[in-house]
Amino acid sequence: MVQESKSKVAIVGGGPAGCVCAYFLQKDFDVTIFEARSPLATLLPTGGGRCNIAHAEYDFRALAANYPRGEKFLFSVFSKFGTAETVDFFRSIGVDTYVQDDLRIFPLSNSAVDVRDKLLNSLNRVKIIEQRVDSIIEEGSGFSLVCGKSIHKFNKVVIATGGHSGFSLAENLGHKIIPPRPSLCGLKTKENFVDLSGVSFKNITAEVNGKKYSGDFMFTHTGVTGPVIYYISSIMAREKFPYYIYVNFTGDFDFQSVLNENPHKNIKNLLSDYVPKSFAEFILLHNGVNADEKCHKINGVMRDKILKQLRNFEIEAVGTRPDGEVVTSGGVDLKEINPKTMESNIIPGVYFCGEVLDIDGFCGGFNLQNCWSTAFIAAQGIMLSQ
Ligand SMILES: Cc1cc2nc3c(=O)[nH]c(=O)nc-3n(C[C@H](O)[C@H](O)[C@H](O)COP(=O)(O)OP(=O)(O)OC[C@H]3O[C@@H](n4cnc5c(N)ncnc54)[C@H](O)[C@@H]3O)c2cc1C
């Protein structure tokens, strides 16, 4: 009996998106992943090595609200493959998960290495070629992938090259790329905070463009970082620098009453009840107030200056710095992609998934969720096209 040969699918990029897409296709298609480096190497640093797989938000609209870019596009994607489907998928390949207090979902093993190994082991019918794809050429009803001197022919191609290096393949096929900007990262500041480097605060509030965000915060030798800053860097990813952040380090309390109640305490020690001592010394020094001044000597002008620093501390953000999750805001323009199949509206037979798309979410498992979900939809799109 002559066996009908399977249709050939190339997946360019063996990151989280490419590998999961391959998983869902391997039963019905002849699947090859092309990976320039090592498959799933990009999964290893995720979640500080623990791999924050997803977020325990099971309503697809509420889940999509965590993506400053891509929210509406993801409605139909998440309605078919959201958090519950992700957890089931990982369980099916031997990765049990748990939900942390802050709703982040992690593997029970707390190990990104474990997730990588289980995912790679599940790709038993997929061929992996560790080679960079230099270009994709449309030819009749298929595609030629050029890797150095070798050329490989396929019926369909999935581009899952992530946010850093893969935009040129899509651009050469005629896709528009929304210019990439870093998101979920620390910020460089105009002010010099080198003396405060490492000083951190729990759950402060920071305001940008009239909106308030909360979370932990830290000064660095070139600026500021921490979850609240990652959040702001995401919200502001498409805005121009400089922009201004106003930080409330203490919340509201009646400062004058506290001064009155502690007339003989020195101001530095009093402030140290509310903020780290080094920060208290910093703001007193930079506002011309003697750190050893007794509280009863703090006049109205001094009081207001100190209060402004405690509750409305101005920071001028002038750029990004490479710490944090660092995802790319920008990528293949979603207007050119069908959200029901992930197929290109420009070149039929080409599909996209993961961070190569102009989709990015907040910290908390949302960026990997984008990979798992769009990978599943791309695989389904290819199956439906047969
Ligand atoms: C430090 C850090 C921690 C993070 N932690 C989390 C987390 O806990 N939870 C979360 O949700 N998100 C996290 N993220 C974000 C998450 O890692 C990314 O969103 C995700 O890896 C994107 O997956 P991807 O498959 O789309 O792209 P990538 O992971 O970038 O993979 C793309 C792959 O394609 C390959 N490639 C590119 N071009 C070519 C080519 N021409 N030919 C062949 N191969 C090519 C690359 O080598 C790469 O392996 C973190 C990011 C960082 C940097």
Image (cartoon, grey):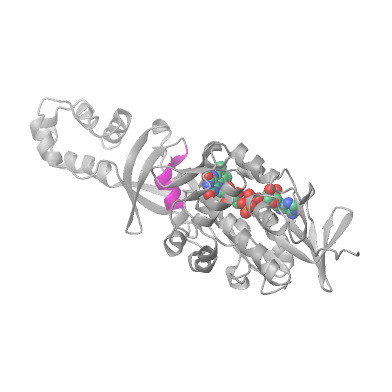
Q: Is residue 116 above or below residue 83?
A: above
Query: Which residue extends farthest front?
Result: 1
Q: Residue at x 56, y 47 (%)?
A: 91
Q: Residue at x 75, y 63 (%)?
A: 157
Q: Is residue 323 visible?
A: no
The C terminus is located in which quarter? bottom right
- Left of 10 or right of it: where is 301? left
Q: Is residue 115 visible?
A: yes
Give the x, y percent position of residue 165: 68, 53
Give the x, y percent position of residue 346: 69, 74
Q: How many marks?
A: 0
Nearer to us in this view, 31 or 266: 31
The answer to which quarter of the image holds residue 141 is bottom right
Q: Which residues are magenta?
A: 222-233
Q: Residue at x 66, y 74 (%)?
A: 345
The answer to which quarter of the image holds residue 171 is bottom right
The answer to which quarter of the image holds residue 242 is bottom left
Nearer to us in this view, 322 or 95: 95
Query: Which residue extends farthest right?
Result: 1
Give the x, y percent position of residue 81: 54, 61
The N terminus is located in which quarter? bottom right
Q: Residue at x 32, y 29 (%)?
A: 278
Give the x, y percent position of residue 24: 67, 57
